[in-house]
Structure formats: structure tokens, C-alpha cells
Image (cartoon, rainbow, N blue to C red):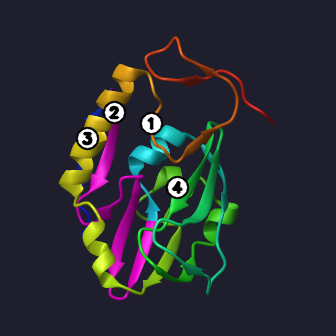
Amino acid sequence: MMGLIEVQAGGIKFNVDDTLLYTETDEWVKVEGEVVRIGVTDYAQKMLRDVVGVELPKQGVKVGRGQAVAVIESIKATAEVYTPVTGVVVEVNERLKEEPELINKDPYGQGWIVAVKIEDAEELKQLLKPQNYIEKTQKRKCRETASHQHPLNLYRWKGRLCRRLRCFKLVKRYS
């Protein structure tokens, strides 16, 4: 049963599922035997805002730990989703092609992105427990606000950025 922890970091409220594992690049991981289901955290989807498209990998593709396995497009940015384990893609969430907004509506449920059959279960030891993820996210958000850098190293910004704000703000979008 999923237990959500409500967290606040730098004025942003987000939820962390206490039954999952996390990466420092804001992916969540649900271990299901030899398979891990991967998605992006509530924090990441809030930073992206409205998700408008998702590029998914093909089933059967071999992926390496740290490799980009999907791309999320939003009205604000484009973000790569990285796999935290080495293995083979055994399932992709085809619903996201027609309903990419599921990532915003239910990031820990119907908004999952890919399932990977793991090659080496030892890689799971590198993942963060919920409390560690919360602490790292809060510390990172404080540093970003103080240094005026925008969060999440996985984002490539579209448009010009305004540095006069506490945090970067998108001031122009490309169609």
C-alpha cells in the first residue's frame, strides 16, 4: 500500500511515495521481483509543469545504468529519463503516447514510463530510500534558490531564461 509523504522544498510542495526507491535525477523505482518499474517523481513533474509528449523506448532494447530511456516534453522544458539499472526494456507505458498528462496526474501510478528486467540486482543498492531522497531534494532546492540556478540537471531549457527572479523563469516558448 502506497504511503505518501508531503514535502516542501523552496516553496514547492510535492509528495514522495515511501514504498519506492529514488535516484538523484528524480526518477522513482518500484522493484517487482526481477523487474523494476520506472517513472519521474512528483517533484520532477511539478518542475516540468504540463507534460505534452513522451518519447518511449522500444521493448526488448538493452539499456545501461544511467542511460536515457525516454524523453518527456512539457510546455516548460524537455527532460530525459534515465534508467538506474542495467537490463532489458520489457514493457513501456503505451498510454502515455495518447495521455502524456498521466505523468502530471498520477506520477507514481498510471504515469509510470518503462519497466526494465534487471541484470544485476546489486545496482539497486545505489538507489536512495525515500527519506534520503527528501533530504537531498530539500538541500538541492535551497542551494538552487540561493545561487539562482534552476533545478534538475536533466532539463534542457527551451527559450530564454530570466535571471532576475529567485529561480529561473521561462519567458519565451518556441512552438
The residue indicated by pointer 2 is 141
Question: Quadrant location of residue 10?
Answer: top left
Query: Looking at the figure, which quarter contains the N terminus?
Result: bottom left
Q: Residue at x 58, y 72 (%)?
A: 93
Few, some or many residues within 10 Å of mark 3 (<14, 14–19, 20+): some
Q: In the image, which disc is placed on residue 151?
A: 1
Q: Residue at x 30, y 28 (%)?
A: 142
Indicate the position of residue 172 as horizontal and vertical percent values: 71, 24
Seen in the picture, residue 20 relative to 63 is either above or below; the reply is above
Does the magenta portion include 169?
Answer: no
Task: Say if mark 2 contacts mark 3, CB within 8 Å.
Answer: no
The residue indicated by pointer 4 is 103
Indicate the position of residue 19 as horizontal and vertical percent values: 24, 66
Q: CA distance from mark 4 to mark 3?
A: 19 Å
Q: CA distance from mark 2 to mark 4?
A: 21 Å
Question: Quadrant location of residue 121?
Answer: bottom left
Q: Is residue 70 left or right of residue 9?
A: right
Which element is circle 4 on? Answer: helix
The residue indicated by pointer 3 is 7
